């Protein structure tokens, strides 16, 4: 419950107005970004209740002030190695089409402005690699490259739908 | 008037509510007077005074608010009453008729006021009614002794009361232009019309179904006629031409039946039932915001004319009612002899008393319905109720957060304990109340089934009696939605496959008329809805053969228990009917039943005896939102099972554990063998093979022999607010929902019927 009190609740007014804003987070050494308009809040890691018959990257459900929301581990979603959660692990709660989902990330970095012209489409090469299909574009900020994620695809990729249809 | 201030509106609403209440009482008094009068009893002065007071106070308030026509109407009624009160006039039936009419008109005006906040645009002809009262005053005071002419004219007038509103309906159409109408009709009014019309249609359907069994029951005819008439009137007011035309034709026929000029034949009643369906679809269109058009209206009208033999009567409805009046009038006038006339009119009077009275009574009850919707029943948006229910759920959670708070508990203070138990009591009461608000009696749903059975019986040339018991049993609104389809499927099956044709039944020595009993009752924490027929029963061999064909069972299963055989019919795509009818037999249906009932955590039981009949029991848990649950821990996960489903929990000694060949563990409790389900394995929490004797086995009641769950620890009992699992996760095997506990943890609620299926191989 303490995690809730530490939660960073983002002002909704800012979300709507700023199209080019991204919330960035770290998975290993790489920085990723999601469009801030989908993000409702960021909370510390908390007790996750696991459920049977779920794809491995779906960690289970958490209680967010009485609301029960599912949690996806982004690391596992990208097919990366599992890593123990620590005090820096965060859950980014995103909301798309009235569906709330928590995304577990190694740590949250910052909110940054990436103008449209600095975003390049994802490279076509190596398209078979897992994870690339979630990429919305590559954002260039100074010398760094941010991998900007397509939140819609991250949550509702057809692979996932197939999985839930089987279970 | 249209720019009325809110304060004024409040005054008006108060006035309407008060007046309606008073009018309701007045109506009862009038009916009592009428009965008294017919029995030749004395008129109670108090009754007259009370009626007088009602009209008088309405008159006063109406004058104050500025409702001119209402003021004038009550004034005339009051004058007539005053005459009666002072003994200037003897109270006669005609007076009571007219007072009833005044009271009805006033109520209609009140409704109109309630919707429009002005008396302008009221469709009734108040001046005409007023005129008749004035004439009655004149007649009665002028020749108190000579009752006959007055009687005669009254007779004529009371006859006219029927066609009068009809004319008004048409009149408004003619007088008021469409644009004016559109301005008058608000969406709320249309909504109200839809609600009222559905009620009227339901009422008519019930009456017609009863009428089929007793075609000579005048009371039913009157009631159908009245409802049809009101529907026509309403539709006319709203300018729904199709509805009012169709109603009109049906009404014409009903009028003939009611006046004894025709007899309602079975096929004619069937047609009217079909007409109701057409009307219903038109009203559904209206509800969906589409125009109230009846497709195929012309064909329907022609069909009605033909089947209901209305050719002559339809020539002109106005003429018909006129000609209907004339012979009676003529007959009365033809009597030259004074005494003869007297006796004739008396006869006429006694004749007219009974139907009139019932008419008035149905009118009264109808009126009561509409009125109570203003005074003591309010319509609430379901969405609001759902929100309330959710909020109550949150309160239950926060209550348990407080009462299970370890810091608070550690205080061990008596005052805190006291407050907590007080809080618990109140929260529980609040929750019960909120749940009760969503409860709806099953009678409405059951009533609809009458029609279904009747149609099926007619179609298949079978005779079926549907007996309904326990319609007053109440279930949650969501339950009602979920059981309506299953019930239809089950009843269809009973009527279609279960009940045999009359000849076949008689051969077996059963009465030719089949019997289906639909009943509901509360048993423990469940509602049982039972459909029992005395038909042919399920055919064990046939089911087994079919199941074998479909590969649902193997040759070895041929001697399985009856109960398991019956459950086979719930498998998708399973049907044993030799021929596919258009109603049932395509094999969809019974699996729908199970799926729907399981959605509300209920289950279906079938029992059948070959040649004797079938019994299907839908067992539905009482409330679906909040349950008492037993919490248990398995590794790190907390599970819950509804307390009502738990039979016992125990630690088993090793000597009682039997390992079957396929690895299934079974324990023996008091000569019963119970299969064990290890939740650890099910949810892949761990694969540690822990001996059964180290955990606790919770035995549940569900399933044929019950089932035992192996858990690590029992945490206790608690009220749980069931929340669905996030849709995002899809269907989770074995878990029906979850609940948030007081400490913020989530517990998973086990889906017992699903789990049992996983253990029990059919």
Image (spheres, coloured by chain):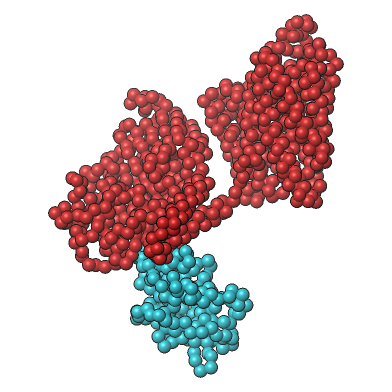
Chain colours: A cyan, B red
Q: What is the x, y in percent for residue B69?
A: 82, 36
Relative to B589, residue B324 above or below? above
- Residue A54, quarter of the rendered image: bottom left
Q: What is the x, y in percent for residue B361?
A: 64, 27
Report the residue at 74% width, 6% height from top.
B340
Left or right: residue A6 versus residue B258 is left
Q: Quadrant of the C terminus of chain A?
A: bottom left
B316 and B409: which is toward the camera: B409
B231 and A14: which is toward the camera: A14
Residue that protrudes farthest toward the front in the picture: B414
Report the residue at 48% width, 51% height from top.
B426
Left or right: residue B654 versus residue A163 is left
Q: Quadrant of the N terminus of chain A?
A: bottom left
Relative to B531, residue B146 above or below? above
Residue that protrudes farthest toward the left in the picture: B655
Q: What is the x, y in percent for residue B702?
A: 31, 48
Relative to B223, residue B16 above or below? below
Query: Can residue B352 be seen?
Result: no
Report the residue at 50% width, 50% height from top.
B430
- Residue A60, quarter of the rendered image: bottom left
- Residue B61, quarter of the rendered image: top right
Report the residue at 44% width, 76% height from top.
A44
Query: Can residue B26 be seen?
Result: yes
B719 and A102: which is toward the camera: B719
Q: What is the x, y in percent for residue A126?
A: 42, 85
């Amino acid at each position: 419950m303490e995690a809730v009190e530490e939660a960073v609740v983002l002002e909704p007014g800012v979300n709507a107005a700023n199209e080019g804003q991204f919330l960035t987070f770290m998975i290993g050494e790489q920085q990723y970004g999601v469009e801030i308009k989908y993000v409702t809040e960021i909370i510390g890691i908390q007790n996750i209740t696991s459920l049977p018959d779920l794809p491995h990257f779906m960690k289970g459900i958490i209680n967010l002030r009485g609301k029960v929301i599912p949690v996806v581990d982004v690391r596992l979603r990208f097919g990366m190695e599992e890593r123990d959660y620590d005090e820096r692990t965060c859950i980014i709660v995103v909301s798309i089409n009235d569906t709330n989902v928590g995304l577990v990330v190694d740590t949250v970095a910052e909110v940054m402005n990436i103008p449209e012209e600095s975003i390049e489409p994802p490279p076509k090469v190596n398209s078979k690699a897992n994870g690339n299909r979630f990429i919305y574009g590559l954002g260039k900020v100074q010398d760094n490259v941010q991998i900007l994620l397509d939140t819609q695809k991250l949550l509702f990729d057809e692979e996932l739908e197939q999985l839930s249809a089987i279970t | 008037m249209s720019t009325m201030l809110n304060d004024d509106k409040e005054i008006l609403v108060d006035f309407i509510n008060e007046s309606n209440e008073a009018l309701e009482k007045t109506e009862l008094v009038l009916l009592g007077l009428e009965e008294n009068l017919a029995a030749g009893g004395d008129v109670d002065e108090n009754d007259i005074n009370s009626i007088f007071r009602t009209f008088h106070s309405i008159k006063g308030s109406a004058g104050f608010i500025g409702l001119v026509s209402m003021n004038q109407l009550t004034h005339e009624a009051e004058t007539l009453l005053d005459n009666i009160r002072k003994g200037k006039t003897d109270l006669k039936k005609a007076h009571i008729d007219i007072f009833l009419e005044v009271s009805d008109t006033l109520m209609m005006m009140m409704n109109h006021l309630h919707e429009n906040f002005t008396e302008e645009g009221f469709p009734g002809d108040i001046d005409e009614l007023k005129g008749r009262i004035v004439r009655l005053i004149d007649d009665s005071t002028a020749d108190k002794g000579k009752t006959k002419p007055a009687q005669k004219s009254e007779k004529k007038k009371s006859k006219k009361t029927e066609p009068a509103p009809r004319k008004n309906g048409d009149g408004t159409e003619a007088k008021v232009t469409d644009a004016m109408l559109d301005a008058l009709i608000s969406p709320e009014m249309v909504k109200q019309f839809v609600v009222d019309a559905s009620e009227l249609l339901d009422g008519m359907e019930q009456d017609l179904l009863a009428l089929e069994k007793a075609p000579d029951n005048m009371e039913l005819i009157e009631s159908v006629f009245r409802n049809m008439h009101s529907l026509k009137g309403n539709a006319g007011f709203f300018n729904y031409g199709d509805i009012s035309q169709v109603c009109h034709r049906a009404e014409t026929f009903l009028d003939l039946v009611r006046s004894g000029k025709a007899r309602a034949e079975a096929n004619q009643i069937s047609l009217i039932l079909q007409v109701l369906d057409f009307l219903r679809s038109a009203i559904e269109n209206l509800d969906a915001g589409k125009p109230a058009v009846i497709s195929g209206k012309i064909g329907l009208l022609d069909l009605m004319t033909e089947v209901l033999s209305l050719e002559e009567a339809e020539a002109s409805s106005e003429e018909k009612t006129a000609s209907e009046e004339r012979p009676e009038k003529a007959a009365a006038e033809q009597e030259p002899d004074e005494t003869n006339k007297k006796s004739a009119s008396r006869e006429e009077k006694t004749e007219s008393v009974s139907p009139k009275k019932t008419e008035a009574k149905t009118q009264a009850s109808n009126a009561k319905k509409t009125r109570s919707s203003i005074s003591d029943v309010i319509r609430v948006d379901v969405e609001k109720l759902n929100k309330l229910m959710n909020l109550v759920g949150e309160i239950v959670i926060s209550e348990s957060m407080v009462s299970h708070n370890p810091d608070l508990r550690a205080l061990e203070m008596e005052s805190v304990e006291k407050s907590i138990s007080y809080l618990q009591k109140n929260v529980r009461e609040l929750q019960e109340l909120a749940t009760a608000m969503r409860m709806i009696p099953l009678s409405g749903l059951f009533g609809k089934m009458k029609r279904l059975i009747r149609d099926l019986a007619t179609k298949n040339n079978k005779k079926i009696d549907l007996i309904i018991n326990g319609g007053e049993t109440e279930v949650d609104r969501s339950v009602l939605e979920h059981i309506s389809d299953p019930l239809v499927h089950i009843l269809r099956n009973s009527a279609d496959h279960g009940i045999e044709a009359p000849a076949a039944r008689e051969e077996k020595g059963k009465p030719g008329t089949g019997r289906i009993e639909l009943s509901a009752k509360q048993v423990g924490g469940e509602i049982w809805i039972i459909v029992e027929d005395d038909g042919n029963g399920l055919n064990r061999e046939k089911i087994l053969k079919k199941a074998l064909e479909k590969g649902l069972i193997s040759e070895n299963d041929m001697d399985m228990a009856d109960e398991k055989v019956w459950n086979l019919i719930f498998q998708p795509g399973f049907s044993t009917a030799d021929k596919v009818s258009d109603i049932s037999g395509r094999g969809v249906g019974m699996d729908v039943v199970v799926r729907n009932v399981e959605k509300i955590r209920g289950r279906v039981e079938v029992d059948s005896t070959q040649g004797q009949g079938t019994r299907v029991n839908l067992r539905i848990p009482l409330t679906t939102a909040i349950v008492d649950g037993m919490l248990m821990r398995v590794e790190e996960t907390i599970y819950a099972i509804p307390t009502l489903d738990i039979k016992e929990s125990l630690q088993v000694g090793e000597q009682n554990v039997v390992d079957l060949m396929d690895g299934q563990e079974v324990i023996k409790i008091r000569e019963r063998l119970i299969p064990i389900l290890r939740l650890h394995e099910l949810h892949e929490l761990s694969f540690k093979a822990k001996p059964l004797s180290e955990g606790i086995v919770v035995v549940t009641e569900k399933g044929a022999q019950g089932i035992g769950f192996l858990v690590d620890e029992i945490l206790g009992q608690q009220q749980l607010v069931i929340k669905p699992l996030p849709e995002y996760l899809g269907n989770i095997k074995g878990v029906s929902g979850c609940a948030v506990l007081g400490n913020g943890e989530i517990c998973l609620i086990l889906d017992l019927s699903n789990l049992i299926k996983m253990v029990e191989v059919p």
